[in-house]
């Protein structure tokens, strides 16, 4: 099995943080006998992310993405994947409840942006 790890985040491209996720995942996948052929880093841009996913699909059996899953508008991973595979994202009420309970537990207000994390 050939694998590609796509790490998403402009902060990675700018060198503001180290891509430790790809290193860790490569080590773990290697122990499972999965060949990691590509590490790709792409910024927070929807079209570039879609193009990166399409390229990965053309050359790998397994694609793992890291990053871009937060509540902010630049977190585009799920939207990009849904676009590439031609699927609509929907809001899952169970996920909304889980997120609400999390914010109650930490005694912080939940913003509407956090509802993005309940979209699948």
Image: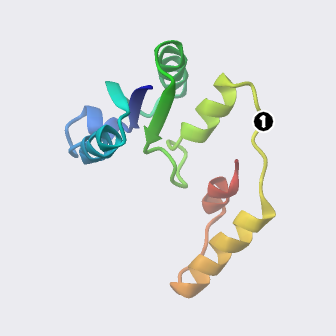
Q: Position of residue 60 (x, y in %)?
A: 47, 20
Q: Quadrant of residue 81?
A: top right
How is the model colour-coded?
rainbow
Q: Residue at x 68, y 32 (%)?
A: 82
Residue 112 visible to the viewer: yes
Q: Position of residue 111 (x, y in %)?
A: 61, 67
Q: Nearer the viewer, residue 9 or 62?
A: 62
Q: Residues within 10 Å of mark 1 (few under 14, many from 20)?
A: few
Q: Position of residue 27 (x, y in %)?
A: 26, 43
Q: Nearer the viewer, residue 54 or 113?
A: 54
Secondary structure of residue under mark 1: loop
Tally of marks: 1
Q: Residue at x 41, y 37 (%)?
A: 8
Quarter of the picture holding the N terminus = top left
Q: Position of residue 49 (x, y in %)?
A: 49, 26
Left or right of residue 81: residue 28: left
Residue 81, compared with residue 89, is above or below; it is: above
Q: Nearer the viewer, residue 86 or 37?
A: 37
Residue 40 visible to the viewer: no
Q: Nearer the viewer, residue 66 or 58?
A: 58
Residue occupied by mark 1: 88
Residue 88, compared with residue 69, is above or below; it is: above
Left or right of residue 38: residue 112: right
Residue 66, compared with residue 95, is above or below; it is: above
Residue 89, compared with residue 52, is above or below; it is: below
Q: Quadrant of residue 38?
A: top left
Q: Residue at x 78, y 35 (%)?
A: 88
């Amino acid at each position: 099995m050939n694998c590609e790890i796509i790490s998403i985040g402009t902060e990675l491209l700018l060198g503001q943080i180290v891509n430790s996720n790809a290193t860790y995942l490569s080590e773990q996948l290697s122990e499972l006998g999965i060949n990691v052929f590509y590490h790709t880093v792409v910024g927070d841009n929807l079209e570039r992310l879609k193009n990166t996913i399409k390229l990965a699909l053309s050359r790998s059996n397994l694609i793992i993405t890291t990053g871009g899953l937060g509540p902010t508008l630049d977190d585009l991973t799920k939207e990009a994947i849904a676009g590439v595979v031609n699927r609509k994202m929907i809001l899952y009420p169970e996920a909304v409840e889980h997120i609400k309970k999390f914010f109650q537990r930490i005694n912080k207000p939940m913003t509407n942006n956090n509802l993005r994390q309940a979209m699948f």
